Amino acid sequence: MSERSTAFHMADVRAKRITARRAVAVGELLAGSAFDAIVERRLPKGDAMGMAEVAGLQGAKNAAQLMPLCHPLALEYAELRCVPVPERRAIRVYCEAAAIARTGVEMEALAGASAALLTLYDLSKPVEPALAIGGVRLLFKEGGKKGLWFHPDGMTAEERAHYRPRALPRLEGVPAAVVTLSDRASRGDYLDVSGAVLVERLRALGAETGPAEVRADEAAPLAARLRELAAAGIRLVLCTGGTGLSPRDVTPEALVQLDARRVPGIGELFRAESSQHTPLAWLSRAEAVLLCDMLVIALPGSAKAAAQGMDILAPILAHALAMVTGEGHA
């Protein structure tokens, strides 16, 4: 007899960055003749909607005990809502779950909604055995590398107003530039990848930017080019490369030559958040300065570090640029 395959495992999330996560799930109990008794809270077993909300909270908190491969998460917040829908004689159940974690809370939201729906079913079946549960799905989720995601079936105006899904702040129409610092890429020894990653991510946020410029690791020419970009009205420049400890890593020295205002928190943020991926992040000399109205951020040169840098910085870039032009704090 062959050995049983163990072709299942928990996802390894150790290398993921801890971020704020949120998810909302929804489902419906088609209550039929039990609808009025549910809404008027006069079922034989008691207040079905009140008990369903309690059960939903328990379900969300115990998702990992119900699903073997689900990561145990300490929820920061959970909310259950039971909303009567008279035109369908249905009870619509919502479960919102939130945590600061390495993995998402979709299963917690779905477990909460399902537990609430099953509780509604249990309390309603003495008066109506022909009940049905349906439409259980994720409405949306936030956080992590993929950011905001909506179910293709969409959301109603009331759902959007209540939950206010938060997308990354846009950089719509912001003139931006990307500069890659690499001796080898500038000689054509290899194709610049990290610059292309930053260009793609900036364009996805709505920024107006051309292809990445590729330059040798030289401090003075970079400083001169940054002054030209500032004079041309560029608002945001992302530099990639030249932030390490080798003798040719001189991007921070180029920023010093600008005699610009330092923004030390950005470099500190990048190192602190990146250290969740690798302890080598503490060796990075990532830096940021403000040259006139242009924000310049120097990031490491690998494509992976560039992508991670955008994951870290994207939530604050729009607000930073608004502050530069005196728009104040949101």
Image (cartoon, rainbow, N blue to C red):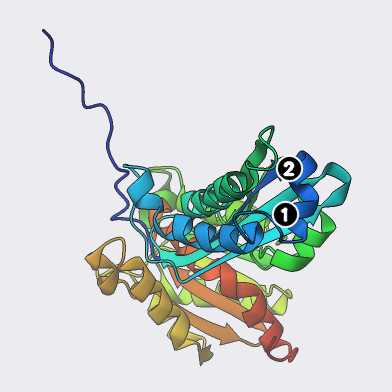
Q: Quadrant of the C terminus?
A: bottom right
Query: Can see residue 171?
Result: no
Q: Between 8 and 257, which is closer to the camera in this rendering?
A: 8
Residue 83: quadrant of the picture: bottom right
User: Do the CB atoms of the residues marked 1 and 2 lie less than 8 Å apart?
Assistant: yes
Q: Which residue is mark 1?
A: 38
Element under disc 2: loop
Q: Position of residue 147 (x, y in %)?
A: 57, 56
- Amino acid under disc 1: Ile
Residue farthest along the right direction in this orientation: 87
Q: Position of residue 213 (x, y in %)?
A: 56, 57
Residue 103: quadrant of the picture: bottom left
Q: Earlier in the sequence, mark 1 or mark 2?
A: 2
- Tell me: 67 left or right of 95: left
In percent of the image, x 51 and y 74: which residue is there? 297
Q: Which residue is mark 2?
A: 31
In percent of the image, x 68 and y 75: which residue is there? 235
Pointer 2 local density, CA inside 10 Å: few below 14, some 14–19, many at least 20? many
Q: Between 313 and 211, which is closer to the camera in this rendering?
A: 313
Q: Quadrant of the N terminus?
A: top left
